Amino acid sequence: MVAQADRLRDVEVCHIHTEGPLPYLEAKYKSSFRPNSFFIGANMRKQLAEGIGDYVPVFLSEIPLLFSRRILPVDVALIQVSPPDAHGYCSLGPSVDVSVSAIQSAKYVMAQVNPRVPRTHGDGLIPVSMIHAAVEVDEPIYEVHPAPIGDTDRKIGQYVASLVEDGATLQLGIGGIPNATLAELIHHKGLGIHTEMFSDGVIDLVERGVITGEHKAVLPYRIVSSFVMGSQRVYDFIDDNPAVIMKQASYTNDTAIIRRNPKVTAINSAIEVDITGQVCADTIGTRQYSGVGGQMDFVRGASLSEGGKPIIALPSITSRGQSKIVPFLTEGAGVTTTRAHVHYIVTEYGIANLYGQNLRQRARSLIQIAHPDHREELEEQAFERFGSL
């Protein structure tokens, strides 16, 4: 695409989370490409802050509606697939998410055909007849290797794991806290997975017989996800594995489907939480850091599930020592999850269950799990707002 930049003008490029370099974001291509993305990764935060590109706040589950309703019409869908099988079907492999809807809505489908793409079961099988043009490559799938689990993440993981019951259906993502939580679940029984995405940490629990899916109401005995990101180990795990069903995000993130599973335990993170329970997970003040994604879908789905537990887990402070439990969200910050939806907030200092608590009680509970260095200031701010705690 970049190779043809000289002859292209004002091409809108849309995507969700991506990894690796994005050369079309270079300033010299500004007249050729116009990024308009649904999720912001580390590879484009700087450029977005500089005014190169735009961000669309939207639930991951509703991106397909933007395509199908022609709110964001798709002219060309750029996809990566496995080579066709004996029946003429290619697989989208680890990235089904919104790709299927983009293909169905596009006027023209261009595919990179890569034998390294794992063949997955579910919604991501695409007949060759839907592909208008293809180019063959042979290159590794981008890998994200699990980072070592630090002491703070390990402590948070222990608290989160204590909330997980046997037979629960889990939603969790990638990163230190999800990995630390999974590491603490080795003695649990009969867990299931219905999630937006998963990574390497799930594999050990499958091999130990902890994750079986036997209690799930929706696709029991199957791991359900819309995309997978991790090391080659997880790509090998999903390859032709009938225990893994890759579905569109409009399915995995559908609250009506999520809630049907028992004891849905949704584990998500945040950038900051104010003392009333408002959660900001996608901006740092006015700076767009990530995206809305599917947090609200799973928070709501878990809260409506029989025995469900929506959990927001985060360190009490930033790397610079600033409190993540705050009196007020930073000016310009977005509210990803409202205080009416929040149940559990977890830091390395404990668990606060805000469900059913009034504003004064919430402030008290959250201050108790804030970093000790910031509790006095938070108490002063809470007293000024609510009076005695």
Image (cartoon, rainbow, N blue to C red):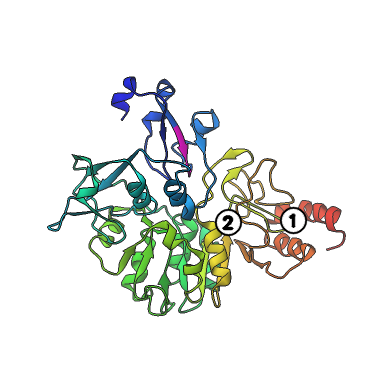
Amino acid type of the residue that numbered disc 1 sits on in the rendered structure: Arg
| Residue at the image point whose x is 47% and y is 64% from the top | 171
Magenta-colored segment: predominant secondary structure = strand
Residue 198's tag is none
First to last magenta residue range? 35-39
Q: Which mark is residue 314?
A: 2
In the displayed structure, does residue 67 sit left or right of residue 359?
A: left
**Residue 375, which numbered label?**
1
Residue 177 at x, y percent in the picture: 50, 59
Please tell me which residue lies in front, 164 or 15.
15
Is 28 drawn above or below residue 286 in the view shown?
Answer: above
Which SS class for mark 2? loop
Question: With 324 as the anchor, is 147 left or right in this view?
Answer: left
Q: Return the x and y of residue 144 as percentages of the image width and height.
A: 36, 49
Label 2 crowd (10 A; few <14 / some 14-19 / many >=20): many
Left or right of residue 97, residue 138 in this image: left
Label 2 is placed on what type of residue? Leu
- Between disc 2 and disc 1, whose residue precedes? 2
Along the line of sight, which residue is nearer the eye, 107 or 142? 107
